[in-house]
Image (cartoon, rainbow, N blue to C red):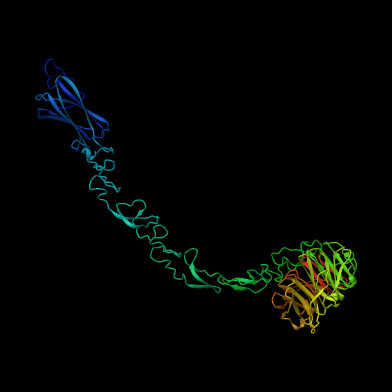
Amino acid sequence: MKGLILLPLALLFLGCGHPPGATEAAVHVQASYDFRAGCIVVEAHDKDAPAKAQSQRIVVKGRLPPAKVDIAVFRGADWGRTLAITVTAHEQKCDGPEVARATREYTLEKAGVETLEVALSATDADGDGYMAPSSGGTDCDDSDKESNPGITTEVCDGRDNDCRNGVDDGLTFSDYYLDEDGDGVGAGAPVHACAPSSHYVALSGDCDDKDPARFPGNPELCNGVDDNCAGGIDEPFTQKGQSCSNTGCPGTYVCNSAHTGTECNALPPTSYYPDADGDGEGALGSAPQNVCATDPVPAGKVTNHTDCDDLDAYNKSTGTELCDDRDNNCANGKTDEAAVCAGKGWKQLGSPTIPTSHGWNTVALGTGGLQVWIAGLSGALIYRGSSTGAFTDFNQKCGNINWNAAWVRPSDGSVFLAGDGGSLAMYTANAASCTSSSTASASNTPSSRPLQGIIGFESGGTTTLYVVNDEGAFYSWTPGDAPTLKFQRSSGDPYWDIHGVTPSTLLLAAGNSSSTADIHSYNVTTDSRASFTLSGVPSANNGTVQGLWAWDSTHAYAVGKKGLLLWWDGNATWYFFSPDPSMKVDLNSVSAPDAYSAYIASQDGKIRRPVVGGWVEHFTATGALKDIAASSRQDIWAVGNGIVVHFPE
């Protein structure tokens, strides 16, 4: 009997007219397959005598599908003409698991070769040559070519690589912990694995797995955090929280900025210096008051001491030099440098600026100093209506009166005069006539005593004047009406001056029989009078008050004989204020546009101003000065017998 042979077939010699012999007929089995088979086995036997069989094994491992094999099948000499042919495919090798089978019957009726096509199919999804169990194969995971029985080494990859004993069998397993913050120490429930997955580590015990700066074994810093997960905070730094001090200022030990240790958080004390004038600079050379940060800032003090004149808010180291005869920028006592006055300065005026020389008693200024009125003996009266130029002479325009005091109405610059014989006058520059009156014709208690002071107020289109005389009488006068006596001192002692910014707070320079300082107040609205207490006046300086000036309703200066200088802050007491009590020159008049600008006309012809270190002597005239008026520190006038002084001129 012929066996099975692989094609090509040997040439067959065919007989004619009789059934073919065993070698005269054959079946050409063409077996195709669509998977990576290891072996194809073709078996043929006599259908009626199965024991009469032959088979052929064909190793096809390594062939890529689709593929086919060709085999010639001959019947044995003693076989019947009908053959049973079975084709099987095997995994990996010929004795491997059968994964596909096809069985056919074929009868050889005539000589020659007949073709029998057989198609085999098995599942090998991952193409690794190992079939799925559904096809009879041994692949434990037909979706993964890295898992099949042909792999001999198990690796840690979460797979059953060798398809024996399960996933990752034979490997060493350990516990791993999720490390969310990447600091090398994990936390939470362990994962038992042969190798750590991403973000998993072998160490556990992280007390804060959201913070990479906190984990066991980390050095503990001084930062208020449990860096080493030891259950404490800043435990090596035992000094933290204890009391400490810095130059007497209390504090507590806290972590330093490098977090490597502790330091005392107490700030050193701040030195404060008196700033009496409120200009933001403390007095040069003054003693400091050391204040801790936990204590309140002392009132009236600042942290610098650069002010060369702490009684003058217009003088300080950061000031801008102006034309005011002051050291505004604290330039070693230099005043008005850098040509800020453009050649002007203090000047005693004469002809032709002053048309005639008279015994001048009083000077008064309009708003902003634009109107200047000067009056004096025998009806002397001159006027300047601009900042420069000559005065206009209105001599005796309001009579041959010794004028002792003047006030200028802000609304129109008209002057109001008070003088000997109780005379009163109102005059507008270049008017044809003067409006005159006299306390001698008062509607009640007439008096022809000399008037010494005058002040006026405008309200609702009406101007009201208040005047005082040398017998202590106080009159009011509305031009067009007769003067009215408001009150008179029972002692008959004089009033030498009157000033104030409201009719409810009028200040009166009062004389007395002992020729000592005395100041009264009068409220026109309530018709009430009061006497002030004087504090700290040395007996050597206790002279009669000659003049006073208020720049608001609660502040004023007063001056008098023997170098008397007093200060008022709105309360019931005036205070002695002289920077040098040894200076006992009679002070005749004061004008103070503000607290730092008390300009004083003196009997010795000097114009003085008090400062920290003593008296500033701005100018010395040729004789005694009787009155002074300043619209500002940059516009000052003073007069005396035949003397008119102006700054700047």
Quadrant of the rendering where the C terminus is positioned: bottom right
Q: Residue at x 26, y 48 (%)?
A: 167
- Image height of 252 relative to 511, above or below: above
Residue 24 image position (x, y, % from top left): 14, 20
Residue 486 can be seen, yes or no: yes
Horizontally, is 398 left or right of 631 in the view? Answer: right
Residue 627, compared with residue 49, is above or below; it is: below
Residue at the front extreme of this rendering: 443
Residue 464: image location, x then y, percent: 79, 69
The relative height of residue 309 versus residue 211 in the rendered view (above or below) is below
Q: Tell me where residue 283 sits by quadrant.
A: bottom right
Q: Residue furthest bottom?
A: 514
Q: Residue 463, image x and y in percent?
A: 79, 67
Is residue 578 visible in this depiction of the protein? no
Q: Is residue 372 above or below residue 589?
A: above
User: In which quadrant of the rendered view does residue 404 lie?
Assistant: bottom right
- Dividing the picture into quarters, in which one does residue 216 lie? bottom left
